[in-house]
Image: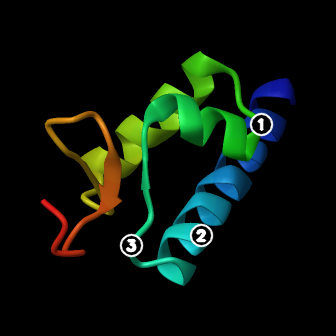
Amino acid sequence: MQASVQNVLRQDILIRICAEYREMPGLTLRRDQARRLWGLDDTTCGQLLDALVESRFLQRRTDGRYVRTGSGRD
């Protein structure tokens, strides 16, 4: 039961992150900024950002900032 609750919460957070990147097309965040913005611990934040990079919704720039893929801000 606990795992399914965590999966639902994780999915809710992913939806929120995607919504914020869609609402603010120029949004660029470092991992520490994202962690504070969404109130996440460092491990969870990293896992979620990595999942969004793997799904190609986000990309991680060489300076460590996460931007929405296709935003033209490489």
In-image side of 74 versus 46 (left or right):
left
Residue 34 image-quadrant placement: top right
x and y, in percent, of residue 41 in the image: 69, 21
Residue bearing the label numbered 2: 20
Quarter of the picture holding the C terminus: bottom left
Question: At 71% from the left edge and 31% from the top edge, which residue is drawn?
Answer: 40
Out of 49 and 55, give the one closest to the viewer: 49
Distance between mark 1 and mark 3 Cα atoms? 21 Å
Image spot of residue 52 (x, y percent): 38, 50
Q: Position of residue 1 (x, y in %)?
A: 87, 30
Secondary structure found at label 3:
loop
Q: Position of residue 60 (x, y in %)?
A: 24, 43
Q: Which residue is mark 1?
A: 39
For discs 1 and 3, the disc positioned in front in the rendered view = 3
- Asked whether residue 7 is in view, the answer is no
Q: Counting other residues with Cα less than 10 Å from the Cα at mark 2, is it few (<14), some (14-19), or many (20 or more)?
A: few
State the separation of the CA atoms marked 1 and 2: 14 Å
